[in-house]
C-alpha cells in the first residue's frame, strides 16, 4: 500500500457519505490509489456513482474495453512504480474475463487491488434473471488459488476494513493481487449513522524485517573467502539506490553475474561481471560460470532450483549456496510456479535487495569495475528482417533516448536490448500466456508518464499478443499516454510452429504441416488499421530497414506529442538459437 495513505475523509465537498458505496469510495481515495481501471458493470453501479459523483474521480477512472486489459494495465503500472493500482470487475462474468491477467500478476509477484462485485446476496433483493446469473455463492473461489487474499464483507464497516487489509496484503513482500468482492445491495444501502473515523495510514504494511545478524556474519565470511562467486539476479526492485548497491556488492566480491530476461533490468548489461546472454533460459556461458562457482548467491531467482538442475543435473552441488527470497510465502499447491525446490546453506527470509544492502555494509565497498557502454550495432540492411535485425534498427533509431523496454518478444535476449538503468527493461508477464502485452505496455507507459517523463516507453510485441488485447491501446489514446509499440508481424503464433515441428520430426511426419491451425493468413490482418481504429497513429506494413527508419522517425514525433504510435513490422520467423533449441527439446 502506498505510504501516502491518509485519514478517511467522511465528506466530499459539502456532502457527507449517504450510501454504502460512498464509504467504499472514500476508503479507496484514502488509500491514495491514483487510478482505477475498469470495464463498467451493473453489479457495481453504486460504487461507480460514488466514484464519479461523491469523491469526484479521485481515484481517476481508466475506462478499458476488456477486463483482462484492465488487470494488465494495473500490472504494468505496478512493474514501474511498485505500487498497486485498483481494478474494478463486474460480477462473476467480469472476473472470469480477468482471470488470466490476475494469474500473470500472481506469478510476477506484483501488487494489484482487485475490487469485485456480485448481485445481491439476499435473494429477496435480486431482479429477475440478470441478478441471478450474476450472483455467485463463493465468487472468490474462481481465483483463490492465485491471489494472496480475498474477502466478501457482509457490512459497510467490514467492507472498509477489508479494503484496508487487502491493500496492505497486496503491498507486503512478496507482493501479489488481492480480491475484495462487494455485494451490490450493500453498495446501494443508505447509511443509518456515520461511521467512525479511520486513519488508513495506520493500516499500512510494516517495513520488511532486517536480516538475521548471525546469518549475515556467516554469509559475509563465506563470501569474503570465495574465489569464484556467482550472483544470480532475480526479482529485484526498480529503485536506483538498490541498483547501485547491487553493482557495488558485485564489484566488492569480484563476482560474476547471471541475469534473467524474464525479470527485466537488474544489473547493467555492459558491466564486465555480466556473463552470457540473458534469456528465458540459461545459455552455455551462464551455465559454465555457475558450474565453476564455489559460492552461488541467489537473489530471488525465478525457479532457482530449475536453474541449478539445468547446470548440475540431479547430482550433488559442490558450491555453497546463499539464498535470499521471501517467495516461499506465496507458494500454493494448485500451481507449480514455485519451481523446483532448491538447496541453500544460508537462507535469508528477507527481501533480496535488503540482504544485498546489508551484505555490502558488512563487507565494505571495493574498487568499481569500469563500465564501457556497448557500441551501437552495425546497421543491417537485410530483408526480410529478422527479430534481431529489428532490434538493431530500433537501437540505432532510438540512440540517445533513455528508453524503457516495457515488453519484449520471445525471440529476443538481453543481447538484443542491453540495459544501463533499472527501468531499462521490465521483463515478462509472469504467467507466460499470450495477450497481456498491450495492457501491460499501456500501464507501464502511464506510470512512466507520471513518474519518469524523460523515459520513452517501448513495447515490442508479437502479432498474436497484440491482436488478443489490442483494445488496451484505446485506453492509452483516451488518456493521452505516450507509447511506442512495435508489432513484429510474422502472421503466426510462431511459438507453436516450433513445437509442432519438433513433434513432427519426432514422429517422422511432414514438417510443412506445422503451420496448420497456427498461421494467421488468408486473409492477412491489417494491424495498422486496427491501431488507427483505437485512436493510435498507425504505420505499416513495414517490410524494409529503410521503411522502418522512416516510420520510426514519424512515430517518435507522434509519441512526443503524447500519442500512441503502432508500427506493423513484417518479421521473419525465428528465435535465438538457444531459445529454439530449448523449445524443441521440450
Image (cartoon, rainbow, N blue to C red):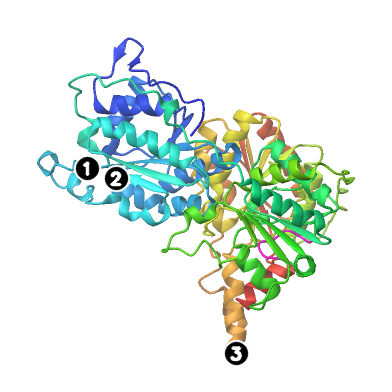
Residue 567 visible in the displayed image: no
Please tell me which residue is depicted at 68% across the width and 49% down the height of the picture. 216
Q: On the rendered structure, is 455 left or right of 479?
A: right
Mark 2 or mark 1, which has the lower sequence index?
Answer: 2
Q: Residue furthest bottom?
A: 508
Of the two numbered discs 3 and 1 in the rendering, the one whose residue sits closer to the viewer: 1
Q: Which one is in front, 202 or 51?
A: 202
Please tell me which residue is depicted at 69% across the width and 43% down the height of the picture. 358
In this rendering, is residue 581 above or below 365? Answer: below
Say few, some or many: other residues with alpha carbon within 10 Å of mark 3 (under 14 / 14 to 19 / 20 or more): few
Q: Which one is in front, 317 or 57?
A: 317
- Which picture quadrant has residue 60? top left
Say few, some or many: other residues with alpha carbon within 10 Å of mark 1 (under 14 / 14 to 19 / 20 or more): many
Q: Are marks 2 and 1 in contact (CB under 8 Å)?
A: yes
Residue 484: give x, y in percent of width and height.
65, 41
Mark 2 or mark 3, which has the lower sequence index?
Answer: 2
- Which picture quadrant has residue 76? top right
Q: From the image, tell me which residue sits under label 2.
A: 91
In this rendering, is residue 340 above or below 512? Answer: above
Q: From the image, tell me which residue sits under label 1.
A: 119
Q: CA distance from mark 2 to mark 3?
A: 49 Å
Q: Which mark is residue 508?
A: 3
Q: CA distance from mark 2 to mark 1?
A: 7 Å
Secondary element at image label 3: loop
Q: CA distance from mark 3 to mark 1?
A: 55 Å
Residue 317: give x, y in percent of width and height.
69, 72
Q: Which one is in front, 347 or 43?
A: 347
Secondary element at image label 2: helix
Secondary element at image label 1: loop
Q: Which residues are magenta?
A: 276-282
Q: On the rendered structure, is 529 left or right of 582?
A: left
Amino acid at each position: 500500500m502506498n505510504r501516502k495513505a491518509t485519514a478517511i475523509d467522511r465528506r466530499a465537498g459539502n456532502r457527507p457519505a449517504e450510501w454504502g458505496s460512498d464509504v467504499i469510495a472514500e476508503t479507496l481515495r484514502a488509500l491514495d490509489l491514483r487510478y482505477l481501471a475498469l470495464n463498467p458493470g451493473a453489479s457495481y453501479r453504486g460504487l461507480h456513482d460514488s466514484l464519479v459523483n461523491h469523491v469526484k474521480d479521485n481515484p481517476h477512472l481508466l475506462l478499458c474495453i476488456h477486463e483482462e486489459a484492465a488487470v494488465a494495465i494495473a500490472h504494468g503500472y505496478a512493474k514501474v512504480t511498485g505500487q498497486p493500482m485498483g481494478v474494478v470487475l463486474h460480477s462473476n462474468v467480469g472476473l472470469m474475463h480477468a482471470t488470466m491477467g490476475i494469474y500473470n500478476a500472481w506469478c510476477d509477484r506484483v501488487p494489484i487491488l482487485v475490487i469485485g462485485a456480485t448481485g445481491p446476496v439476499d435473494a429477496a433483493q435480486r431482479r429477475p434473471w440478470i441478478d441471478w446469473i450474476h450472483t455467485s455463492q463463493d465468487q472468490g473461489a474462481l481465483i483463490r488459488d492465485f491471489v494472496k487474499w480475498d474477502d466478501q464483507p457482509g457490512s459497510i464497516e467490514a467492507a472498509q476494513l477489508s479494503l484496508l487489509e487487502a491493500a496492505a496484503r497486496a503491498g507486503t513482500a512478496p507482493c501479489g493481487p488481492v480480491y475484495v468482492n462487494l455485494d451490490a445491495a450493500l453498495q446501494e444501502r443508505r447509511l443509518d449513522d456515520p461511521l467512525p473515523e479511520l486513519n488508513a495510514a495506520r493500516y499500512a504494511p510494516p517495513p520488511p524485517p532486517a536480516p538475521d545478524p548471525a546469518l549475515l556474519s556467516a554469509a559475509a565470511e563465506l563470501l569474503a573467502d570465495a574465489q569464484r562467486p556467482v550472483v544470480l539476479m532475480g526479482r529485484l526492485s526498480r529503485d536506483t539506490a538498490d541498483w547501485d548497491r547491487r553493482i557495488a556488492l558485485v564489484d566488492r566480491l569480484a563476482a560474476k553475474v547471471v541475469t534473467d530476461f524474464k525479470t527485466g533490468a537488474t544489473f547493467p548489461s555492459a558491466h564486465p561481471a555480466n556473463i552470457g546472454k540473458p534469456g528465458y533460459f540459461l545459455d552455455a556461458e551462464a551455465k559454465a560460470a555457475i558450474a565453476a562457482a564455489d559460492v552461488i548467491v541467489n537473489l530471488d531467482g525465478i525457479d532457482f532450483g530449475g536453474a541449478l538442475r539445468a547446470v548440475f543435473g540431479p547430482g550433488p552441488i559442490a558450491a555453497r549456496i546463499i539464498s535470499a527470497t521471501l517467495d516461499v510465502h506465496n507458494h500454493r499447491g494448485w500451481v507449480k510456479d514455485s519451481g523446483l525446490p532448491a538447496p541453500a546453506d544460508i537462507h535469508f527470509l528477507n527481501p533480496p535487495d535488503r540482504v544485498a544492502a546489508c551484505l555490502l555494509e558488512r563487507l565494505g565497498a571495493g574498487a568499481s569495475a569500469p563500465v564501457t557502454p556497448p557500441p551501437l550495432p552495425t546497421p543491417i540492411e537485410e530483408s526480410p528482417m529478422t527479430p534481431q535485425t529489428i532490434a538493431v534498427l530500433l537501437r540505432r533509431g532510438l540512440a540517445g533516448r533513455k528508453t524503457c523496454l516495457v515488453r519484449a518478444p520471445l525471440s529476443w535476449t538481453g543481447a538484443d536490448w542491453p540495459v544501463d538503468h533499472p527501468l531499462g527493461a521490465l521483463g515478462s508477464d509472469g504467467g507466460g500466456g499470450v495477450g497481456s502485452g498491450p495492457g501491460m505496455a499501456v500501464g507501464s507507459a502511464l506510470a512512466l508518464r507520471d513518474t519518469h517523463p524523460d523515459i520513452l516507453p517501448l513495447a515490442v510485441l508479437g502479432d498474436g499478443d497484440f491482436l488478443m488485447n489490442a483494445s488496451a491501446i484505446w485506453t492509452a489514446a483516451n488518456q493521452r499516454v505516450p507509447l511506442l509499440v512495435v508489432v513484429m508481424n510474422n502472421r503466426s503464433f510462431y511459438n507453436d510452429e516450433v513445437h509442432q515441428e519438433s513433434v513432427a520430426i519426432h514422429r517422422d511426419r511432414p514438417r510443412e504441416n506445422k503451420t496448420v491451425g497456427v498461421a494467421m493468413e488468408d486473409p492477412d490482418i491489417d494491424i495498422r488499421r486496427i491501431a488507427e481504429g483505437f485512436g493510435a497513429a498507425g504505420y505499416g506494413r513495414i517490410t524494409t530497414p529503410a521503411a522502418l527508419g522512416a516510420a520510426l522517425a514519424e512515430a517518435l514525433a507522434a509519441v512526443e506529442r503524447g500519442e500512441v504510435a503502432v508500427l506493423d513490422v513484417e518479421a521473419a520467423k525465428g528465435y535465438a538459437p538457444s531459445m529454439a533449441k530449448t523449445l524443441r527439446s521440450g
